[in-house]
Every structure is written in C-alpha cells, then in structure tokens.
Amino acid sequence: MRLKVTLLSVFTFAGLAAQNIQNNPGSNHGNKFEQLGTILPTPNIYRTASGSPGHGYWQNRADYNISAYLDEDKRNLKGSETITYYNNSPDDLDYIWLQLDENEASSINKANYPTSTTLPKTINDQKLKITELPGKDNGYGVHLEKVTDESGNALRYTVNKTMMRIDLPKILKKGEKFTLKIDWNYNITNRIKMGGRGGYENFPEDGNDLYTMTQWYPRMCVYSDFHGWQNHQFTGRGEFALAFGNFKVSMNVPADHVVGGTGECKNYEQVLSSEQLSRYRKAQSSSEPVEIVTLDEAKKAEKNRSKQRKTWVFEANNVRDFAWTSSRKFIWDGMGVVIPENNNKVMAMSFYGKEAYGLYRKFSTKAVAHTIKTYSEFTIPYPYPVAQSVEAANGMEYPMICFNFGRTEKDGTYSEGTKNGMIGVIIHEVGHNFFPMIINSDERQWTWMDEGLNTFTEYLTEERWDNKFPSKRGPAWTIVDYMKLPKDQLEPIMSNSENIVQFGPNAYSKPATGLNILRETIMGRELFDKAYKTYAKRWAFKHPEPADFFRTMEDASGEDLDWFWRGWFYGTDPVDIAIDKVTIATPDLDAVPAPKEVKYKVDKALVNDFEDLSKIRNREDKNITFYVDKDKEAQDFYYRYDRGQEKVDQNKEYSLTQDNDMALDKQQKEKFKNIQAYQIDFVNKGGLVMPIILEFTFEDGTKLYDKSSAQIWRLNEQKATKTYYFEKKLKSIQLDPMRETADIDTSNNFWSNDGSTSETSRFQVFKQKHEGAVRGGANGKVNPMQAAGKK
C-alpha cells in the first residue's frame, strides 16, 4: 500500500519497525546464533581454543623400507617391508594396528558393509563372474607370508577384515620405537571391471597392462590424541588416516616398463637410456614440457614385451603414503617449476598412453605446474621435489603422484567437455597434495575435510586457469538442486563418510560452496584468505580435526562464524529468503500537528510493591548516606509527594501543554521534498540464515546495492525488516542478484512498482528469453551459439 504520512512519521518508521521486532521475538528465536559450545571438543594442551596445535601436541611416525616385485604374467605383487614405528605419544602401547586395504577386494576378508541389492533387469556372464557368492574365496586380498620383529622372531597378530593388530612383545613406551618386518603378496585386481583405486587395466588392442599400485602394502594406522587408534574398516569409500614418515622403495618390474612414484627416483642413470636421461635433465630447466620417453618409443615398447627386469629405487621424506605406476605403454614428459614462496624447484611430470596423447601432451604437465603454484599461494608453499599426473581412466590421489582420466577419440579428437573434465580432475587430484597429503585430516571420519577443502581450492585454481572455466562445484548456484532435495535424502556435512547417501554433493560440493560463500559474501576475500592460509600453515604435516578448522577461521579473522558452521555444516536447512512485502511511505511536508493540551490525573507514586530486605537494612544502617538531589526535590512532583512534602487531590485534573517544534522552514522542505521511504519485509522460508543482499533499480535506470549481514536475523530467525530512504523512485528490488547465497527459490526474490508480482524473477525472465532465442524466438532468429554448434 502507499501511505501519505508526516515527515516525522517517515523518519521514525524504521525505528518503530525495528523496535517491534526486537521487543517481541517470541517463539521465533531459536538457536541459530548460539555458540557451538559443547558441540566442539574441549580445548586442551594438544589442541587450543584458538584452533592451533597446543604446546603438548604430538603425533607418531612410521618409516618404511619396501621391496616390491611385479609379476606381470601372473598379475601378482610380492613385497617385503620393514617398518620402524616411533611412539611419540604420552601413552604406553601394548599393540599396534595396520591397514590391509587390499582385503577390500577379498570376498571373505572385506569390511562387510553391505548395501541393499535388487535384481537387475538383465544379467550376463561378466556380472556373474564378479558376483560374490556366499562363502566362496575369490582369491584376492593380502596373503601374509611372515610377520616378525627385526631379529626374525615371529610376532602374534590378528587380522580383522581390513585391519591387522600386532601384539607387541613388550610395552612400547613414550619416546621408544619398534621395528617389524612383513612379507606378503596379493593377486592384482582388474580395477576397470572390479572397481577400486589400485590394480591393472588391460588394453586388448596391444595386449599390455597399465598398473596403478595404491594401498598396496600393509600400512600403519594413525594413533592420535583425539581418536586413539583409527582402525575403522576400509569399505572402499572412507579414505585414509596415515602417519608421516620416510620411505625407501624399490620396484622390480619388466625392463621395458616406465615407473613413476611418490618421491624422487634415485637411479635414473641405471634404468633410463642415455637419450632419455639427457631429455630428463633438459626438462628440469625447461619452461615447456619435454618428452622424456617419446610417443614413438612407447609404441615400439608396446610391441615387444621384454623378458628382462629392472629395479627402480625411489625415496620420499615426510610423506604419509607411497604409490606408484608401471607400464610399457607410457609416454613421459616433464618440465621444471619454481614455487616463488619458498624458491622450491619442482619437477612437474605426466605419464600417459598413446590413447591420451592428444590431450595429455598439450595440457597435463602444464596443469600440474599451475596447480602447485596456485595452491601454494592460497595455502602453503609446495614443499616436495616432484608432482606427477598419470592418465589411468579414473581419479585418485597420493603424495606427489595422482591418477586421472583424459583420453581422446581414436582419431585423436576430443570434446570440450572431455578436455575441461580432464583439466578439472588433474587440478583436483594434484591439489590433494595439500589436502590431505600435507594438511593431513582423518578421511576415514571426515571426508569433507580433504574433499571439500580441496574442491574449494580447486575452484579457485580453475578460475586462475581460465576465468570462464565451467566449474561444477564451488559457485553457490551450483548447489541449489542438492539443497532442494527432501530432508530424508540429506545428511549434515558433519556425517561419517560411510553414512552419506548423496556422497558427491555432501562431501565435495556443499563444503566447497560454503567456503566460497564465506570468502565472497560473508567474510570478504582479505579476511578469508588470511584465515585459510593460517589454517594450512598451522596444520601442515599434522592431523587437524573439524574444530581446529572452525576455530582457526574465527581466530585469524575476528569473525564469529558459529552460526554458519551450525547451519551449513551441522544442519540440512536450505537458503530460501523471500521478499514478503514492500511498504512505501511519502512525506506530507505541510501536515504539522498543532500544539495540544494533555489532560491527566495524579496517580500514586511508583514505588516497589514489596519492601525487600536490602532496602530495610539500608535504611537501618546509620553508615549509609542516601544521595540527595536538591533540583530533583524542587522539580520532581512525585519525589515530594512520596515523601509527604506535597499534598495533592487525586481527583483533581491537571494539564500540560506540549509545544510542537516540527514545523519545517522552506529550506528543509526543499531538502526533503523527494524523499520516499520503503519498508521491505523478508521471510526466512528455508531456515538457513544468510546475509540479505539487494539490488535497487530506480526509474531513471540507475542502480544501488546494499548488503546486511546475517546478524539481521539474530533476534528473529523467521522475519526481518529493512527500511530505506531514497530521493528518487524505485522501479524494482532484486534479492540476491548474483545468486551468491544458494537461495533455492528465486521466484520470491523480486519486487516491482509496476504491480507485477514476484512470481517471475529476473533470472527466470532471462532464462525464458534465452530459451526463446535458442528455439528461434518470436522473430525467428537463430541463436548464434546454436548456429556455431556450441552448447
């Protein structure tokens, strides 16, 4: 409605509206702005209230010396390892736990976390082969040959599915170390058919295999101050909690294989030809990728399977894991990269078969270099000597090496979607060097702490690669479809990895989107970037928990974000803020109320109904002198009346004249003649609070933007009101014009003064116009993007 009110009313309108909301929060006030309090663990000497490691922080360490033998004919891997485990904890340990991840491929030793199954519409021989019949051993999983101490004495051990407990011969006390030896082997799975991260892929056209050796050796579990032993079973989803240590690994493989692995190869002189070694050294100082093993060499190797063998030796220090790859199919290129922040010289490299040559040769190594440089800017300087990308039909990450997809068509062509998908997955997997390979969170419990943080930083890196990069995760509007789902299909981000139904949106997209909203909309880039970098620096090469992240982000920025963590990470409510009503008020500059006489009767003086003990004792205390104000005695009628100094007739009517000083002079009228007031009422329909961001469009075509922080919902979590005063008339109001809050319903985000409703938002109008153009539109013109064959 349109109101004509006095100027006084115009300028008290906002104050009265705000007062009504604040004085009557009623049942609308919930807990969205309460502190997380006991939801977070109590700070202690290991983890402080500021989010940093405490003065008593500790973590255990495991060093590995491993020899591996790859039998390509039998597709079997045989290994022997020596583990030295350091107990830096304050606790006495009488047993230790190791992970046997390869047991997840076993039909009898897997973790046995089943899900519901239904009959397929069709079934074939291949499906029958991989179907696990009850009680039948499929032959996969770790075969333990020997478990001893360093003197060769047998150790008692128990295998529980994907975990192995070793009972120590004596208590391992603080500051002590224990050395054990394990000999083992396992049959390598076909990862394309059976799934999983490690295994082989066979290429029928040339008869060769490509091996990705991951989770391939018995590995120490993490023992920590916050969890004890992290020995939750490996189901194939929740990834890994691992201890840092130093690795020395030798891989005996067919002589014509090319090997890439975590860390630096220490014997290139023995395993490379003189030409390949020369190219490698050239690549170290090249700013463009150099082929170390060429396409022609790889094609030649595919045709002649060598019966000879070579041993490649790698070393890696201060890493949490070790992975490697081996195949005669590999083309191998590399280039040198310098990280400005620490002047670290890194060898960026890629390994790929001829099937991926058209894409990987152009983009892979450059994407590796771009990723470690950009992540170094947003987190910590990349500390390792190499970073590698391997084309292996799928994606997975390990220290200094990762596996990605990206193959061309047989004629060497590729789609834009394949190219962007490949670049995105390379950035993502290489980025995992930072989260969680260095900032080493517990993936078995909190997937979002590595996948979510990494996906967010991937988004920042994709933007630096190409400002128009079609990122699918990170921008707020991309999470809307997930947030619209019914509540029974959603879990909080703070859920265990094994219990998440919508795994990708929950563990990757929603946390990445939340961090982007924090950076762009809530905190601002300067505050966010400093806090994010502080978290990375504090927890590099350590084991952070969610509270360490939440607390550090607040500690380093000075922002109270508990409301955000509570809503976005612990809840499932979506954002749906609506413009409920717009009220317009215009001033009547000549309507000035005249002076008036107010009639009243004298009432009793206002005193307490009950004389409490303190007042009585104060009067009896002779040492107390009461404050006496002579002016108050002279001016205050009720003060004298209460003390018997004034006699009044309570039936007599008294009067008081109120003067009006609101009449406006000519100059004031000219100043305020164009003022219009707009009260905008908002409703929080979704439940999740967010800043209120408005775009005002005036009748003269100009625009104005305004943002109110989420704190506007603090005293009433369902309703909020904002009043604005403008010297020109509004044409329209758009809520969240850049779609930066992940609002799931934009149809209620628009108001116009021409009488149109908010049912059709500006975004829908744009969409309708765009769809009309694609279809030919009313004028029959063809969309130029469609004519060019682009999507």
Image (tube, helix red, strand yellow):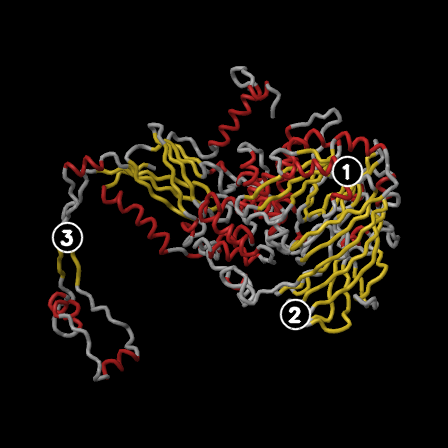
Q: Which residue is at the front of the view, 221 or 129?
A: 221
For label 2, the crowd category at 10 Å Cα-Cα, with few meaning under 14, some 14 to 19 and many 20 or more, is few
Q: Disc 2 marks which residue?
A: 175
| Left or right of 781 in this view: 636 | left
SS assignment at label 1:
loop
Residue drawn at point x = 75 percent, y = 34 percent: 353
| Left or right of 728 in this view: 294 | right
Q: Which residue is at the front of the view, 231 or 339?
A: 339
- Label annotation for residue 187: none
Task: From the image, state whether disc 2 or disc 3 is nearer to you.
Answer: 2
Q: Which amino acid lies under the numbered mark 3 shown in the image of this protein? A: Gln
Q: Which amino acid lies under the numbered mark 1 shown in the image of this protein? A: Ser
Q: Disc 3 marks which residue?
A: 658
Is 2 located above or below residue 594 in the figure? above
For label 3, the crowd category at 10 Å Cα-Cα, with few meaning under 14, some 14 to 19 and many 20 or more, is few
Is 1 located above or below residue 627 in the figure? above
Task: From the image, state whether disc 3 or disc 1 is nearer to you.
Answer: 1
Q: Disc 2 or 3, which lies upstream in sequence?
A: 2
| Left or right of 171 in this view: 252 | right
The alpha-carbon separation of the residues under discs 2 and 1 comes to: 46 Å
Residue drawn at point x = 59 percent, y = 37 percent: 472
- Asked whether residue 717 appears in the rendered view, the answer is yes
Task: Estimate the x, y position of residue 288 in percent, counting from the top left.
Answer: 62, 33
Q: Disc 3 or 1, which lies upstream in sequence?
A: 1
The alpha-carbon separation of the residues under discs 2 and 3 comes to: 84 Å
Q: Disc 2 or 1, which lies upstream in sequence?
A: 2
Q: Which amino acid lies under the numbered mark 2 shown in the image of this protein? A: Gly
Instruction: Classify the position of the N terminus by image quarter.
Output: top left
The alpha-carbon separation of the residues under discs 3 and 1 comes to: 103 Å
Q: Disc 1 marks which residue?
A: 273
Instruction: Classify the position of the C terminus by image quarter.
Output: top right
SS assignment at label 3:
strand
